[in-house]
Image (cartoon, rainbow, N blue to C red):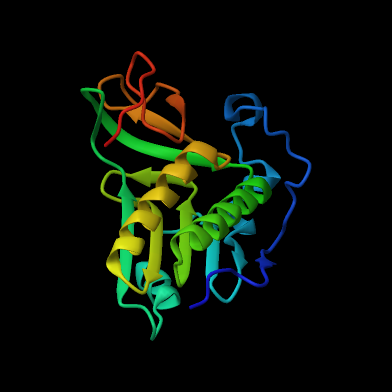
Amino acid sequence: MTTEATSSQLVSNHETASSASVSATPAQTSTSKPSSILDPANFPQSLESPTIFISLVYTPLDIPKYLQFTRSPTAGANVLFLGTTRDNFDSRPVSRLSYQAYPSLALKSLHAIAEDVQRKHGLEKIAIVHRLGEVKVEEESIAVSVSSGHRAAGWKGAEEILERVKARAEIWKKEWFADTGEMEEGVWRANKDRDAKGNVINK
């Protein structure tokens, strides 16, 4: 069983975010037009090794591709999680979400999470893909696919990856609410669900 990626390669049209500051917020850096590091023309951006695939994309997620990557003849379990935009949050109607990131930092964080969880749970392969830009209701924003020898490791590993991605990755989401009209700028949130009082919502 392979438990650790041996090499990784950045696959990208342009990689330009190496000097971005982690402490900055999307609201401080966003403009009416995409900045160069978030220009959709520069994506997808990916980190790939024989057992780990990480990618940031602006297009709809290619679920069969990620499942194909994580399949293994020695894996008896394949676990797939898809995070989708729901039409409500904290009792308010949501019309859509959008995501921004510091690509180079986010890719490295996602890869580090995958390597650590792979070692911890003895997973065969891992794919983590996060979408950027606007994600409409019922569309997927994140895919986590893992394979393992047995299902217990797969379930636990996929869940841990998701929670750690939400807590650590340099990715932020913005929510638009249908009850305030299209003129509202939207609300920036860390990539973790919190209610109006700031409490974490575990759903």
Q: Residue at x 30, y 48 (%)?
A: 84
Pick the residue in front: 192 or 141. 192
Quadrant, the C terminus: top left
Which of the 4 quarters of the picture holds residue 200? top left
Query: Residue 61: in sight, yes or no?
Result: no
How many tags in the picture? 0
Q: Is residue 162 above or below residue 91?
A: below
Asked whether, in this view, residue 51 is left or right of residue 92, the answer is right
Q: Residue at x 60, y 49 (%)?
A: 109
Which of the 4 quarters of the picture holds residue 168? top right
* Farthest residue, direction right: 19
Find residue 137 and report its horizontal and vertical position in percent. Answer: 28, 43
Find residue 147 and report its horizontal and vertical position in percent. Answer: 38, 70
Asked whether, in this view, residue 153 is left or right of residue 45, the answer is left
Q: Residue at x 76, y 47 (%)?
A: 18
Q: Is residue 199 above or below residue 32?
A: above
Q: Is residue 68 above or below residue 123?
A: below
Find residue 52 and report its horizontal and vertical position in percent. Answer: 54, 68
Query: Residue 107: in sight, yes or no?
Result: yes
Find residue 65 and report its horizontal and vertical position in percent. Answer: 41, 73
Q: Residue at x 36, y 50 (%)?
A: 159
Which of the 4 quarters of the picture holds residue 24? top right
Pick the residue in front: 190 or 76. 76
